[in-house]
Amino acid sequence: MRLVLYPPVKPDWFTEIASAAPQVEVINCQTEQEALDAIREADAFCGEITPHMLAAASRLRWVQAPRIGLEHYMFPALAQNDVVLTNVRGVYSDIVADHAMSLVLCLARELYLYARQQRAHTWQRGAPLLDLARSTMGIIGLGGIGVAVARRAVGFGIRVIAVDPRRTDKPEGVVELWQPDRLTDLLALSDVVVICAPHTPETERMIRAEQLGQMKRTAYLVNVGRGAIVDLADLTEALRAGVIAGAGLDVFEVEPLPADHPLWDLPNAVITPHAASLCPNDKVDARRLQIVVDNVRRFVAGEPLRNVVDKQMWY
């Protein structure tokens, strides 16, 4: 049995992965050509697979993607192939949820307005506030990040509702869980809408002018999912026109957000540069490695793999 790694992993990672299955030939390829040659007789592959590599593989059964979002990983031949694809879903859940709640709190307490007043040396109280304990949060996408956001929101006394296409069990604290066809209801009821969904064919530009118009004029939109879910031009116009009260955005349809984009100057927009997953220590790397090592053990033992991806849905 052969496992191919490419791009090459660090020596300590290689040792951990190889130790998980001593009976497996593990090849830590240094070049794409080396990976192309090695994958011909490989049973498993971990890393960034290409169409040429997949076409060359004669007995490949499992591919481990080193990332969570697969919108830039998937290609038609991979989606149509019988090979099992897994990802590292879950490694950022608590980190991104912390960032999402930071944006929620910033908007709810109007901290961004006070920050501007500080720069202007202006002492002025009375910014409008959102009473979190009497508010409703609507979460779009109740995967690992969405559940972690819900858990934090409940701690502030927020009523949580959600839509998700696959989840059927309501995590503790989530009072309503609907299919995406109830998105209109979620938007209309929510004081804060938090997007935690991945970029898939179904979620691309899910939020446009029509959906923004279904939100309360006093509501906020927070996006820590993927930028392609929200139409950037429609959101900019909605913020400018007061269709919604404000937005906290970590991801954008175009990244980096162009320096001359009008969104930068809107007073009701809080912008962070796709920074929600940043972490000051190595715990994310440790989590990622743990998933790979666990899946190697499972693959060799013939057990179900973790984080199997629906290749048509990209997650």
Image: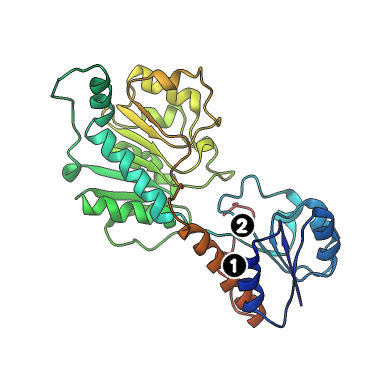
Picture coordinates of residue 48 (x, y %)? 70, 54
Residue 189 makes an appearance in the image:
no
Residue 140 makes an appearance in the image:
yes
Picture coordinates of residue 103 (x, y %)? 33, 38
Q: Indicate the quadrant containing the C terminus: top left, top right, bottom left or bottom right.
A: bottom right
**Drawn side of residue 312 relative to residue 259, left or right:** right
Question: Helix, strand or loop at disc 1?
Answer: helix
Which residue corresponds to the image point at 34% horizontal and 40% vertical from the top-left?
A: 193
Report how far apart the C-alphas of labels 1 and 2 lie in the structure: 8 Å
Crowding near pointer 1: few (<14 within 10 Å), some, many (20+)? Answer: many
Picture coordinates of residue 118 (x, y %)? 23, 23
In the picture of the structure, the residue carrying the numbered disc 2 is 66
Which residue corresponds to the image point at 46% horizontal and 54% vertical from the top-left?
A: 92
**Drawn side of residue 122 relative to residue 227, left or right:** left
Q: Is residue 200 placed above or below 91 in the rendered structure? A: above
Which residue corresponds to the image point at 56% horizontal and 73% vertical from the top-left?
A: 294
Crowding near pointer 2: few (<14 within 10 Å), some, many (20+)? Answer: many
Which residue corresponds to the image point at 41% horizontal and 53% vertical from the top-left?
A: 145
Picture coordinates of residue 242 (x, y %)? 32, 20
Going from the N terminus, do you reach mark 1 or mark 2 first? Answer: 2
**Drawn side of residue 301 relative to residue 151, left or right:** right
Residue 114's disc is none
Question: Helix, strand or loop at disc 2?
Answer: loop
Q: Indicate the quadrant containing the N terminus: top left, top right, bottom left or bottom right.
A: bottom right
Whether residues under marks 1 and 2 lie with C-beta atoms below 8 angstroms apart, the answer is yes
**Drawn side of residue 305 relative to residue 80, left or right:** left
Relative depth, front residue between 244 and 126:
126
Disc 1 residue type?
Val
Disc 2 residue type?
Pro
Where residue 6 sits, quadrant-wise, is bottom right
In the picture of the structure, the residue carrying the numbered disc 1 is 292
